[in-house]
Structure formats: structure tokens, C-alpha cells
Image: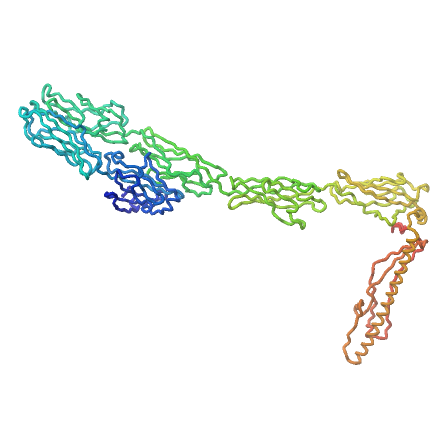
Amino acid sequence: MACGIPPSSRCVQWRFGCRGQALFVILCLFTRSSVTGQARYSVAEEQGEGSFVGNIARDLGLDVARLVSGKARIITKGSRQYVDLNRDKGTLVIKERIDREQLCGKTTPCSFSFEVILESPIQLHRVTVEVIDINDNSPSFPKDEISLNIVENAAAGTRFSLESAYDPDVGINDIQKYILKPVVNFKLEVQSRTHGGTLIEMVLQNPLDRETEETHTLVLIASDGGEPHRSGTVRIHITVLDANDNAPVCSQPVYKAEVNENSPEGTVVTTVSANDADKGVNGDVTFSIAHVTREATQLFEVNVKTGEIKVSGKLDFEKSKTYQLNVKASDHGGYSDTCNVIIQIIDENDNVPTIQMMSFSNSISEDSPPGTTIAVINVDDEDSDSNGVVKCSINADMPFKIESSLTGYYTIVTDNFLDRETISEYNITITVSDQGSPPLTSRKHINVKVSDVNDNLPTFYQSEYIKTVPENNSPGFSVFTLSASDADWGQNARFSYFLEEKMINGAAVSSLVSVNSESGVIHAVRSFDYEQLKWFEFNVTARDAGSPPLSSVAIVRIVVQDQNDNPPQVLYPVQTGGSLVAEMVPRSVDVGYLVTKVVAVDVDSGQNAWLSYKLQKATDRALFEVGLQNGEIRTIRQVTDKDAVKQRLTVIVEDNGQPSRSATVIVNVAVADSFPEVLSEFTDFTQDKEYNDNLTFYLVLALAVVSFLFITCLVVIISVKIYRWRQSRVMYHSNLPVIPYYPPRYSDTLGTGTLQHVYNYEVCRTTDSRKSDCKFGGAGTMQRIQSEKSILDEPDSPLEVRKNIQCVYSLIGGPLVSPRTLKS
């Protein structure tokens, strides 16, 4: 498995040079949805700021425009960011000087990782940068000088351990060889230990003679293999002692021990021991730690006399899992042996899992489909084994779920459809727990707001509104206020009211009412008249400002309420200014006799049209009464001779409105048994003589003119008939076709000629010819009786003309009376 990815992934490798170092780029493209690719670069340490690392856009197959539009950025776990992203060029450059020794120590290979994240849509790319070591450190020894005491009788081949040098560099740049100068009495042997580290021993080649040379000075040189080569030296001062013929021997060549991390200082790790066959002072063995790193000397200490190794610093499994100590057992004669102690640090669950937001969108549209990513998080636990295995979860009562997208990375996506109107925001708690004992847990809270989309119609509280408006209202009268609501938010919840145009009784509805687009108040544009418009109906639309806009319709019915704005109208008796109408009542009538009936109507409705009749004035109130509801005038007592012939009644007609309106009518009643008696009482109401004489003159003149015209028409018709008869005879003898001729204003129906009109006259006269009157009736049609043979066929038949003139002369004079009176 290359790059730590499944074999099914595709990997491409490039090789290029950078400042003389061989750099490798391995791009691993994933087929997963949230982690699109992975890239690996190599860069030498100690490069200056702005140095080129790699072209991330090209290596990941991304356009530079995509980096800019996706707001590409680098997410690091630690507080330091060594590499920066140039989005405009799609390249990675050095942001801060990288010191490999400070970053990784002796760990090889040395690398650090970060993520490049893009938004819209969210894409995650992991980038690993390997830091290549350069030879920027020289080997160094723990001490500048080493002092050794060697007995003069030490046998050839005796070994003396020396402290090794330390070089922070690694690989070829680390220590490659040791040189001892001079090599007259000693030679140098270097051995690599199985568990790491180097054992340097100085071997005696020739016996020493204290008496000849009591001290010797040697130089130990440690050299690395870098370019340029670097080296470090230490001086060795040897003092030749008298004989001590037994060296200490470690009880075990290798000691292995385990200790828990975070163990308190003074915790005993293990105890080393050594034996010396010598007696007395030469047999006393002392212990010391030699040939180890500075870090190890700060964490452990050894008891000089007992060889007990204790913790002297804070152990951290996450920094180093194993430590190797070289415990030197020395006697006073200068002999020594080295005990190798390997200490294994046991991990404890002392690190709480960490949660880092790699990408987070705190707002999500409510129409987002399931599977929409809202956050990418990185979870890390520095512990190992089960202590470092984490489980990530979120609230169970949320329409979201968490998915693992890559080792240590989780994606929070929608698990269902969202509805902002039901829940407008969610507080999600991310919980991460490891499997240590006891388990450690960390939590992170995020707030996700659901952004609104226009998915709700404006809703009226009623689908139909019925409101009453009194007629004769003033223009601008506020009828009522429509009310609607929209469950959406913001711009999507802002709506306006619109009046749907339509025609009502030939007029546009906008000429009747108007609606305020903001408040929904409906105003009457003009005054309503119940008698012309009793009710009307229109639609009001509420339309929101969303995109696309949504709307709903409410039906509004305006009912015009009748007001008592019309007085009663009297239909009978008709009041005329030129003639007098009177009702005749014989003196012999019984009580309750129906004289006449006042008929009135009111164009209003309801109680405003309920009419009542009352007798307001009367010549004799004791003789007549008026029906309150029906307006019938009846006698309430027997008529006597003492009662005046002329009776004048004033009847008032009132409606039931508030306030009530009324009309009055005058009814003339003649109490008499004969018509002449009536005329004598009503002479003061007759017309003057001059007017009646003129009327008689005009009647006679009209009759003469009509008679003349009638006779003239008859003569013309007879002449035309004779002419046509003669023409037909001539045509008959000449075998020519006969074309009938019709004079103007002459009609021939079925071959029979006739005048176009018949004039009827009805003339009424009184005993006084000055009081005569004439009435013109409507025109009728005279038809001529058609004979079985046409006059054209029987030229010798006589022409029949029927004259229809009616004129009735009455020999009585006086005022006109009602037909009922005349009939009496």
C-alpha cells in the first residue's frame, strides 16, 4: 500500500531538483467524495522564506481559478505553519524557516502534514512535506576532556569505554567514523548496538609502564559524512596507576525495564549490579550514566553506590517510547564495564482527544438535499493503541449524521430534509471519546442556522371575507383590513396586496374599491348606492417578494347596507296640476265603504320600505279613515245630508326608517248622489271660458283637416286603380308584360289597396259647450275588403271604400271625472 492509501488509488511521482537536493513529489488521488487528493513533497531544511515547495494546483489537477473561488487555505494541527499557499499561482512556498532537528530530532524520515481545504463544494487535500536533512550541525562530545586511570599492569587487549559524540543530523550527515590519535599504545574499536547507539572502546595494544611514562594524552575525533564534512574532538588524559588486575563485570549485559509515563520523580525503574573480584578499595564498584543523550540524562538518574535507576524528569510516551541508558560500572583501579539498560515507556490515557474544525458553514439552505456537507472536522488523540482509538458522534435527535471520510477526519452531513419554519437553527454537539481506561472525552458545540427559501405561500386568515358597508358612504371610507401571514423569513416573508381587476355592472372594480399594498386596508373609492348596487365581489392577491414570488387569493364580498335615503312615492291618486280628480261617494253608502286606495312605494329595502298611512288633515275627520298598512280610505259612519259635498283629505305616507321619510297626497272626495250636484260644488276648479273656446276651435279644425286628407287619398287611389286597369287592357291587347305601379305611401296587400292609417277621435262635451274637451286616440290601420277577384281582373266592379271615423260628442259639460265615477 503506497502512501498509506488503498491500492485502488492512483499515484503519480515526480522528481525535480531544489538547491542541489533531490526532491520527490508523490501525488495520490483518492476516489472518495470529501478527500479528493493527497500530495507529498520533499524540501531541504533551513531554506529561506518564500522558497518554492511545489505546484499544488498542477499536482492535484486543479485550476488556479478554482483555488481562488474555493477560498483555498492551509489548515495545520500545530500552532506553527511552515508552508504557505499562493492561491494566485497555485504554488506552495516556505513561510517559516524549517529546522529538521528541532522539528523531528533523530526521527527519520522527518515530515509534517497539513490539509488544503476548498469550499463550494468542500474538498479536502492532505499534503505531506518531508524535510530533508542538511549537514548543518557538527558532532560534539558531552565533555571536552576525558580522564582515565589505567593500572600499569593492564593486559594488552583491555578495553576502556569512551563517551560517544552526538550529532543532531541524521543519515549521511550523522557521525560516520571515529579516529583516535595517536595509536602507539591504544587502538579504537567502534561497535553498533542492536537497539541503537554506538559503543566506543579504546583497546590497550601495548602494556603501559608508569615508571617510563606516567601520563598519556590522546585525541578522539568524530566525523560525519556530510558535505562539507564536520567533526568534533575530545581530549583523553590517561594516568597510569599501579596494578589493579580485575575489572568490574555487569551482572547482565542488557537490562530491560518498563515504566509508566507521567510517573512521579523518584520512581524506581530498575537496579543494575556489577561484580569485581578484587578486594578492598579495588573491589568497590561505582555506577554512572555515560554515553547517552542529554534528554536521557535529564529524565533518569542512577545511584552511584547501589546502581538504582530512578525517574528524575517528566516522561511522555508521545515524545519518546523508548530510552537506552549506558550505565558504567567502575572500580577505583580504573577498570570499568558498561551495562546496557533499555527502558520502555508504557502509554497512559493522559491525552484528551482534540477536535479541530477544518471547514464549517454555519448556514445551510432549507432546500439542501440529504448528504449536503456542513462541516469537516479533524479528530486526534496523541495516545497510542486503544488509548488513541477515538469514536466521534453527534446528537441523535438531529437531522444530521457524521461520516468518517479519512483517518482522523469526519464529515457532518444532512441526513434528512430541513424545514426552517419548523426549526430555524440547530445546536450540534460533537462528542469524541477514546477507548482508554478511564475513557477521556472532549466536546465541541457548533450552531447551524437554516437559511430560508421561499417555499410558503402567503396565507389569509380567511379564504372569504364578507363585509357590510352602509350606502352613501364618503369616498375613501375604510371598509376593513385584510390580514395575511407568511411562514417564511426576511424578504420571502414580505408580501404586498393587489386588487385583481374585473368588471362589475360595467364598471372596473378599481373604480369601486382600492387596497393598500402594504397594510391591506380596503377603501371605498366612491359612494355606494344600494338601489343601484346591492353587493359585489372581487379578489385580493397577497404576493410575497421571494424568488420566484408566491401568492394566494382571498375572495372579498362587499354588501351595501340600505339607508333610508329615499322618501315614499305616491303612485295613486296621481297629482296633476291641470285637472282635478275626485272620488264620488253616494250618500246612501254603508259604513266601511271603500272610497279609494292610496298606493305608494319606497325604493329602499327592509324596514326602510315598510310604509304606513295616516290621515293628516280632513274636512271631516269623523267621516273617513285611512288603513294604517294598506292605505284604503273608507267611511267610518253613515253619510248624512249635512255632510259637505266637497271633502278634502290629506294623507301622509311614512316609511319605517331612522329617521323616517314621508310624502303627502291630497284626495278630493265628492259626497253626492248625482253628477250635476258634484259639478256645482267644483266650479271654482273649472277652466276659464277662453281656454275652452280655443280648445273647441282646434278640435274642429283638426277634424276638417283630417277629413280633407282622407277624401284626397281616396280620390288618388281610385285614379291610380283606373289608370292601372286601362294600362293592363292595353298591355293585354299588345301582348306586353304588365308592370303594376304603386303610388307613394300606398300599400297593396294581396292585391287590395288601402290607406295607410285610420284616424280615431273621441270627443266628449258637457252641457256647457265652453267646457268641451277632445281626446285623440292612437292611429289604427284600415283595411280594404278584398274581393275574390282583383280589380285588375274585373275592371267593371265598383270600388269599395270604407270610412272609419268615430266622433262622440257629449252634451254635458264640466270637469273630467274618473272612469269609476262615470260608470256610476
Q: Nearer the viewer, residue 451 or 261?
A: 451
Residue 482 seen from this side: yes
Q: 396 above or below 545?
A: above
* Scheme of image coloration: rainbow
Q: Where is residue 673 drawn, in percent x and y?
A: 93, 47
Q: Is residue 397 left or right of residue 75?
A: right
Q: Where is residue 609 drawn, in percent x and y?
A: 76, 42
Circle count: 0
Q: Is residue 362 left or right of residue 141?
A: right
Q: Where is residue 444 drawn, in percent x and y?
A: 39, 33
Q: Is residue 179 left or right of residue 560?
A: left
Q: Nearer the viewer, residue 247 or 674?
A: 247
| The quarter of the displayed image where residue 338 is located | top left
For image coordinates 78% across by 73% down, the residue present is: 740
Q: Where is residue 362 drawn, in percent x and y?
A: 43, 37
Farthest residue, direction top? 280
| The quarter of the displayed image where residue 709 is located | bottom right
Residue 588 seen from this side: no
**Which quarter of the rendering shows the N terminus?**
top left
For image coordinates 89% across by 61% down, the residue present is: 703
Q: Is residue 19 left or right of residue 286?
A: right
Farthest residue, direction bottom? 734
